[in-house]
Image (cartoon, coloured by chain):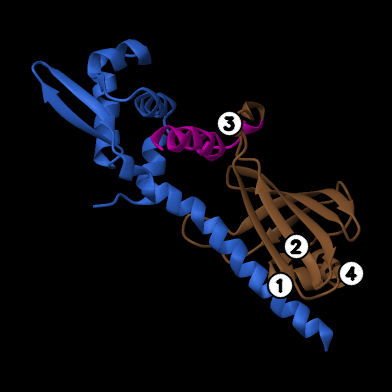
Amino acid sequence: MTATRSLVIEKELAHPVGKVWRALTQGALIQEWLMDNDFQPQVGHKFTFRSTPMPNWNGVIDSEVLVVEPHKTLAYRWNSMGLQSVVVWTLVATSGGTLVRMEQSGFRPDQEANYQGANYGWQKFIGGLERVVAGLQ
Amino acid sequence: MQASTDSVFKALGDPTRRAIFEKLSREGEQTVHALTDFAGVSQPAVSKHLGALKLVGLVRDRRQGRETHYSVEPDGLVPLIDWLGLYGAFWRDRFDRLEDLLKRMDQ
């Protein structure tokens, strides 16, 4: 069992890398497919994604840009109500367009230091859940 | 009957209760006595925690002689697994929207 629980979605899109990169890094475009935001493609830039609040979720995601490698890699934090994770986008040019890979990770049981302030302890819980689920199977 | 995600989160929000649940998951069925030794709190406190876990469907109990044995109810985690799955559904939906946007950017 690995230490990190992550969610990976990969899809080949029939569009060139440069165009996909723009959709991922220009605030107005990001808003069209993801969420309202004040994103800037600068490492260290702190921003928020805002969505319509739902039951059990206030709709706010606190973020910080971690990696910007044009046309290749984009990473930012994805923290919301005690869930602390990182979203990494990786783009690879293919003959038909671009292979787009999104990995959301950070549900790690060993990140004790990052739990502070997480009132619900969800992240810690998810780490525990992973052990539990692994134990059941 | 399935407990709500909320109630399962609440039940596991308590560290002692979560530790008890994790121990049951790792090591299988345990008596209340054994769990009391493990948890380092009083037996009534352990029984109360087990009652809370049972109420939301995370554990089941079985009496044998004077002892009550507890074990994990595997289906109890379903609400939480569903909750994690929501993130998968969320990102798949956003991928579709990204693709729609890219098509419009062509024009």
Quarter of the figure that contains the C terminus of chain A:
top left
> Which residue is the site of mark 1?
B98
**Crowd tier of the residue under label 3, counting other residues whose Cα lies within 10 Å: few below 14, some 14–19, many 20 or above:** some
Chain for disc number 4: A
Compute the Cα span from label 3 to label 1.
32 Å
The rendered magenta stretch, by its main secondary structure, is classed as helix
Badge 2 and badge 4 both on one subunit = yes
Q: Nearer the viewer, mark 2 or mark 1?
A: 2
**Crowd tier of the residue under label 2, counting other residues whose Cα lies within 10 Å: few below 14, some 14–19, many 20 or above:** many
Q: Which mark is residue A100?
A: 2
> Which residue is the site of mark 3?
A109
Question: How many circles with numbers are drawn on the protein?
Answer: 4
For chain B, the rendered hue is blue
Secondary element under disc 2, as helix, strand or loop, is strand
Asked whether disc 3 touches disc 2, contact meaning CB atoms under 8 Å apart, the reply is no
Q: Nearer the viewer, mark 3 or mark 2?
A: 2
Along the viewing direction, whichever of B64 and B9 lies nearer the viewer: B64
The amino acid marked with disc number 1 is: Leu
Q: Quadrant of residue B61?
A: top left
Chain for disc number 2: A
Please tell me which residue is depicted at 66% across the width and 54% down the height of the picture: A61
Compute the Cα span from label 4 to label 3.
37 Å
> Which residue is the site of mark 4?
A18
